[in-house]
Image (spheres, helix red, strand yellow):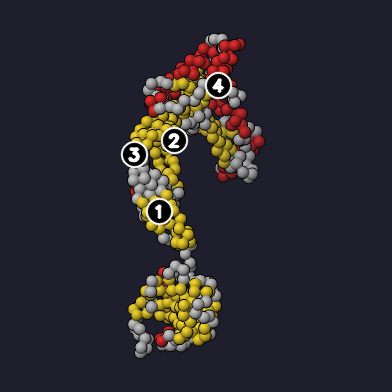
């Protein structure tokens, strides 16, 4: 019995081994394991798994075969959504899917996503936006309705014309006046132009007709020019029926406003809050679209460029209106230069008076928003009186530190007296420097005193062209004399410890109209 089971067990292992060998070498649906990266690929089409292959390139080959089968089944144009994805993996062994099964799975999947395009249509590109309309007439009607909002009297018409710059058959828009359109139609209907003597006489009279000055009532007010802001292109194509819009839906979609970012250049008087209010934004929205704005207190200056968000239709319209209006106006100020005054001095000689005038202007708009205005005729009813200002042209003198190095040992203003007899209010700066340090003129001027004066010890006074005076005290040696003219930075003395002094230093003082002021008001 034991011998029988031993023999049976041996036969089982022999048979199992034989089956494994046959599986590896005789069955084509299994692949041997080789560690060279992905060797099994799952094919997904529109999110559904189609099967497994051992070569990634087979996925594209099978998809093309499935498309050919579908195309051969119908003479109609098809639109099929086909999003294929291939995911690879490395396996020890695995089962692949038969080619016919994968192609059949793909055919079924594509058929469920196909749409038979039975309708010819026009794809219209409006800048970066695209819609599909049923006919050329619908395209023209869409463009006409967009214009009609700004041209209610229909002074202009819009036509679709071939774009000569394109190699394929593309149409673009042509907006012309009704009169021009009638002339164009007559020409196309072979109306003969003027010829011979008639044409020459017409040209002669056109040339000699005098240019008569126009009065206000002679101007043609209202719309003068209109065009689309975006490029308009239309091309004939075939699309699924559910991707073609009705005219009414297209009009509503194209004229509906969308948020568009644009640039606002900061003008004098602008604040972040006023800019936000002008564009219908709150402060949080304005800061979010401008990363350089830290918060609502960020400083802005005229000329800065701020991004703002405005509501604009998908197809914007630019147009020019000729308008009549009356307005108050101010005359440009008049400046009279005075070569004996410094530039920081001005005086108003005459105050401005506002005037009043009648105006004819060409005003540019975009979607109803005013962009610019150009006055082409005006008549003054009340003359404006300009503001007249007298201003100086002489650059005021500058001031520099009178010594190199050193430090302030006593500042300007109230203080505790450093020694008996010293002032409790200090009229300048005490600059701690060793005796013999070079002292320089802080600004150019005329020396009015160079000698001994009480608590100053040896001192120099210099009067400057702007009415200020500088004083340099406690000097050890004088290098200039009274009446001498000095220039800025010229060496005028050596520092010391003379007069009422507690140690070697320079006393530097600035006076304006005889009154001591802090040196910080003039020093750079």
Q: Give the alpha-carbon distance from disc 1 to disc 3, as whole Å.
A: 22 Å
Disc 1 and disc 2 in contact, CB within 8 angstroms:
no
Please, what secondary structure does the residue beneath circle 3 have? strand
Res. 34 in view: yes
| Residue sitting at the far bottom | 420
Q: Residue at x 61, y 24 (%)?
A: 167
| Left or right relative to 296: residue 99 | right
Which numbered disc, 4 or 2, marks the residue that appears first in the sequence? 4
- Label 1 SS: strand
Residue of label 4? 207
Residue, disc 3: 382
Residue 258: percent from the left, percent from the top?
40, 35
Q: Nearer the viewer, residue 13 or 442?
A: 442
Decide: marks 3, 2 in contact (CB < 8 A)? no
Rendered location of residue 86, percent (x, y):
55, 36
Q: Which residue is mark 2?
A: 374
Q: Which residue is mark 1?
A: 389
In the rendered image, residue 462, in percent from the top left (x then y), is placed at 47, 75
Horizontal side of 419 relative to 479 (left or right) equals left
Query: Height in image: 47 above or below 144?
Result: below
How far is mark 4 from mark 2, CA to CA? 28 Å
- Drawn side of residue 223 relative to residue 79, left or right: left
Q: As rendered, which of 84 and 108 lies closer to the eye? A: 84
Q: Nearer the viewer, mark 1 or mark 2?
A: 1
Which quadrant of the figure has residue 348? Answer: bottom left
Sooner in the amino-acid sequence: mark 1 or mark 2:
2
Neighbours of disc 3 within 10 Å: few (<14), some (14-19), many (20+): some
- Which residue sits at x=40%, y=80%? 410
Nearest-to-viewer mark from 3 and 2? 3
How many residues crowd around disc 4 within 10 Å: few (fewer than 14), some, or many (20 or more)?
Answer: few
Circle 2 SS class: strand
């Amino acid at each position: 019995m034991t011998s029988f089971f031993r023999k049976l067990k041996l036969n089982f292992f022999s048979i199992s081994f034989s089956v494994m060998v046959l599986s590896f070498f005789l069955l084509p649906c299994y692949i041997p394991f080789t560690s060279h990266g992905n060797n099994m690929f799952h094919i997904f089409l529109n999110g559904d798994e189609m099967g497994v292959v051992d070569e990634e390139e087979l996925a594209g080959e099978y998809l093309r075969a499935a498309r050919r089968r579908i195309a051969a089944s119908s003479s109609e144009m098809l639109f099929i959504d086909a999003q294929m994805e291939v995911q690879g993996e490395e396996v020890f062994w695995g089962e692949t899917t038969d080619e016919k099964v994968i192609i059949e799975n793909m055919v079924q999947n594509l058929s469920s996503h196909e749409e038979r395009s039975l309708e010819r249509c026009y794809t219209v590109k409006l800048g970066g936006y695209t819609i599909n309309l049923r006919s050329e007439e619908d395209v023209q009607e869409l463009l006409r309705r967009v214009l009609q909002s700004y041209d209610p009297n229909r002074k202009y018409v819009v036509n679709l014309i071939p774009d000569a710059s394109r190699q394929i058959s593309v149409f673009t828009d042509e907006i012309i006046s009704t009169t021009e359109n009638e002339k164009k139609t007559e020409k196309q209907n072979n109306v003969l132009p003027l010829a011979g003597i008639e044409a020459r006489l017409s040209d002669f009279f056109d040339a000699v007709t005098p240019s008569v000055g126009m009065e206000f009532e002679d101007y043609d007010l209202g719309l003068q020019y209109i065009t689309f802001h975006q490029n308009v292109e239309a091309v004939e194509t075939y699309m699924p029926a559910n991707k073609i819009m009705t005219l009414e839906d297209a009009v509503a979609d194209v004229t509906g406003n969308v948020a568009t970012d644009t640039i606002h250049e900061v003008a004098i008087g602008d604040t972040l809050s006023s800019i936000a209010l002008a564009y219908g934004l709150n402060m949080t929205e304005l800061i979010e679209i401008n990363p350089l704005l830290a918060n609502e207190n960020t400083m802005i200056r005229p000329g800065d460029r701020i991004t703002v968000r405005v509501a604009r239709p998908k197809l914007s319209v630019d147009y020019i209106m000729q308008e009549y209006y009356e307005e108050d106006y101010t005359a440009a100020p008049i400046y009279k230069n005075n070569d004996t005054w410094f530039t920081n001095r001005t005086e108003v000689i005459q105050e401005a008076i506002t005037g009043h005038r009648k105006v004819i202007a060409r005003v540019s708009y975009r979607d109803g928003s005013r962009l610019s205005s150009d006055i082409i005729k005006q008549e003054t009813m009340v003359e404006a009186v300009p503001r007249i200002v007298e201003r100086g042209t002489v650059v005021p003198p500058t001031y520099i530190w009178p010594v190199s190095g050193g430090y302030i040992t006593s500042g300007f203003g109230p203080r505790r007296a450093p020694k008996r007899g010293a002032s409790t209010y200090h009229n300048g700066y005490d600059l701690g420097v060793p005796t013999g340090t070079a002292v320089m003129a802080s600004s150019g001027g005329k020396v009015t005193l160079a000698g001994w004066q009480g608590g100053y010890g040896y001192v120099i006074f210099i009067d400057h062209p702007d009415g200020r005076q500088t004083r340099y005290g406690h000097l050890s040696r004088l290098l200039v004399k009274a009446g001498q003219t000095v220039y800025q930075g010229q060496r005028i003395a050596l520092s010391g410890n003379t007069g009422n002094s507690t140690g070697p230093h320079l006393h530097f003082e600035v006076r304006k109209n005889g009154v001591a002021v802090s040196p910080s008001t003039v020093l750079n």
